[in-house]
Amino acid sequence: MSETAASLKYAPHFVRPTDAVIADLESYAQLLRKWQAVQNLVSRETLNQVWTRHFADSLQILPLLRDGDHNFMDLGSGGGFPALPLAIALKGGPQRFVLVEPNGRKASFLRTVARELDLAVTVFAQRSDQIDSRETPAPDVITSRALAAMPLLCDWMEPFFTSKTRALLHKGREYVEELADSGAHWHHDVLMVPSDTDPGGVILEITNLRRKSVR
Ligand SMILES: C[S@@+](CC[C@H](N)C(=O)[O-])C[C@H]1O[C@@H](n2cnc3c(N)ncnc32)[C@H](O)[C@@H]1O
């Protein structure tokens, strides 16, 4: 499969013609390569596999989305994964994205991509725990890839969680141990969707997140 073809698998979920989405993804890949020289945005070994390791990996969230999912929040966005490929695929739709990334240079990169590609993206250059949940729309969907293990992620997601929020989290094969750890302190309903791109990995769908009361 060619690099681009990996992402084309998700074309039925794009809001715009496939050619327009692929053109924006190509522009994003160019900006990523340009900025990588001054700021490590992705690991060096994945820079030549951006379409499979980053774009297709991010876009696998698309088939899991529901009609009313309009407000997205991505924690620890780094170089923009998974949020920016999703914002590109859904450009022109009602979806709005809040990206949380405390590293100033990475936040500047995210703002540059959003501006150049005209994406419905707001970037908070802060840590997740520094953001007042009243400053952001209540998210329908929270995404996060490679930020933290489940217990800490639950701490950071909880202020933003409503009864309607779903977290769709990229997790590697260690997710079973992570869920055992978070289950000691949190109630959460969990669905596991096998990853299309990471053997042994999953997209974890978390709903009804509530801290267990201490007795
Ligand atoms: C390993 S990178 C993952 C980036 C991206 N999600 C990806 O998968 O390519 C983790 C990112 O989280 C950011 N980060 C670290 N602590 C954070 C916090 N408390 N809240 C939000 N982001 C944080 C780091 O600056 C870094 O860019």
Image (cartoon, helix red, strand yellow):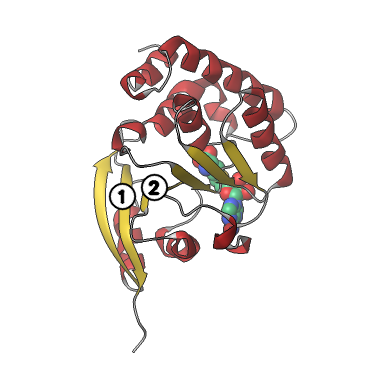
Residue 142 visible, this angle: yes
Which type of secondary structure does the marked residue at label 2 adopt? strand
**Residue 16 x, y percent position in the rendering:** 43, 18
* 201 horizontally vs 28: left or right: left
Q: CA distance from mark 1 to mark 2?
A: 7 Å
The C terminus, quarter of image: bottom left
Contact flag, marks 1 and 2 (Cβ < 8 Å): yes
Give the crowd class for mark 2: few <14, some 14-19, many >=20 residues within 10 Å.
many
**Residue 20 x, y percent position in the rendering:** 49, 13
The residue type indicated by label 1 comes to: Glu
> Residue 78 appears in which quarter of the rendering?
top right
Vertical placement of 19 versus 142: above or below? above
* 50 horizontally vs 193: left or right: right
* Disc on the earlier residue, 1 or 2: 2
The N terminus, quarter of image: top left
Residue placed most toward the observer, 51 or 98: 98
Vertical placement of 129 versus 100: above or below? below
* 100 horizontally vs 107: left or right: left
Give the crowd class for mark 1: few <14, some 14-19, many >=20 residues within 10 Å.
many
Residue 70 — which label? none
Residue placed most toward the observer, 49 or 22: 22
So how many labels did they put on this image?
Answer: 2
* 177 horizontally vs 50: left or right: left
Q: Which residue is mark 2?
A: 169
**Residue 74 x, y percent position in the rendering:** 50, 46
Which type of secondary structure does the marked residue at label 1 adopt? strand
Q: Which residue is mark 1?
A: 205
User: What residue is at 35 percent from the left and 19 percent from the top?
Assistant: 11
